[in-house]
Image: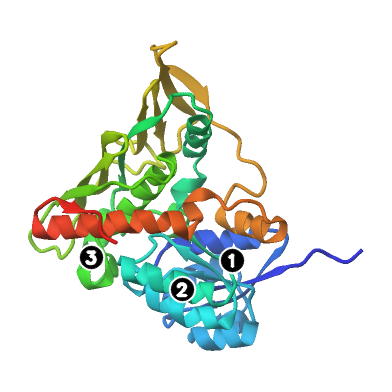
Amino acid sequence: MSEPKKFRVAGVSFDHMHMGDLLRQVREHPRAELVGVADASRERMAGVVASLAVPEERVFTDWRVCLETTQPDLVILCPKTGEHGQYVVDVAPYGTHILVEKPFAARLADADRMIAAVAKTGKTMIINWPLAWYPPHVTTKRLLSEGLIGDVLEVHYYDGNRGPLRHIADKVEITEDEANRQKSESWWYQRSAAGGSLQDYLGYGVTLGTWFLEGRKPVEVTCVTDSKPGLDVDEHSITVCRYATPYSLSKFETRWGTFTDPWTLQPQPKCGFVVMGTHGTISSYDYEPVIRVQTKDQPATQEIPVDTLQPGWRNPIEHLIHYLETGCRLHGPLDPTLCRIGQQIVDSAMLSAKEKRTVTLLD
């Protein structure tokens, strides 16, 4: 019997610190092989290359040479948000599957270019939202699909962290003074690169929120962002979506500057979701071992242990390989069709904040 296929994987662009986490998942998968990494800056790759012991011959400063040399089956892309669209358009002709680290894109037009470019190749593109793998949120979706709290009416989301410069791959902490020093130099704080908490975190909330809402779209979006002297981007945003069927409001709040990081100690407000349905409510907070449920039959809050995620459904590398091997359904928040609805909401929120008015959903 022949050995199972090994998927050749390359990582391109280390602008986003999540590249290190994703490449570690590649290294841990028995049927994945890390064949190359590429970034114009060797310094930006250095920490991950050292921690994963990537051989020198697999390290490139030109991503095109990397792909031509290594012939990967899958390319992981972690460029700055403003460059997602162009990277996918440029990489797609190499005929590889593509994993784009969140968010989807800087704007809806870029998202549509990405979808079209990959569709021409017959390959698969997924958008990875790390929150999509958190057991409380996966458990919440299962219970919503089972009808535990009836029809979903409202999604309330609050999420973020102390700031994108306070940690690197594997959540290694950076001091506050060092993070503040880097703000003037970092793409995270440049509007032209699609920086800011809204661009970083709203996609999480509205993509998973749309998943919880079974793909329903809002008709109107209203967004307000902070405006701190000396900063080019927001560190705090609040977006309200109005839905027509059924008539309801949902709220999505993003925050760089939470009191603590949720993976270390949940801040107040807690990071995660609260979902309200016609027959009950569910609170689903990041990293917690239980979700909390109210129903009409049992109004007092009950704690329900989160599901244990099954092999093939625990992280994006594992899932994409499982999907390609078995043809299973694609984990909902990774599907570009659903992600596009999230991008519509993000674009609408940016327009609303800029023009200081409520806008109809953009398309």
What amino acid is found at the position of numbered circle 3 in the picture? Answer: Tyr
Image coords of residue 17 (percent x, y): 42, 63
Callout 3: few (<14), some (14-19), or many (20+) C-alpha neighbours within 10 Å?
many
View extreme (front): residue: 245
The quadrant in which the N terminus is found is bottom right
Q: Nearer the viewer, residue 125 or 197?
A: 125
In the rendered image, which residue does mark 1 sit on?
52
Q: CA distance from mark 2 to mark 3?
A: 29 Å
Q: Residue at x 27, y 71 (%)?
A: 193
Percent of width and height locating residue 63: 50, 83
Of the two numbered discs 2 and 3 in the rendering, the one whose residue sits closer to the viewer: 2
Question: What residue sits right under mark 3 in the picture?
Answer: 189
- Amino acid type at circle 2 is Ala
Which is more toward the observer, 61 or 283? 283
Relative to 336, say whether 61 is above or below: below
User: Looking at the image, is mark 2 or mark 3 earlier in the sequence?
Assistant: 2
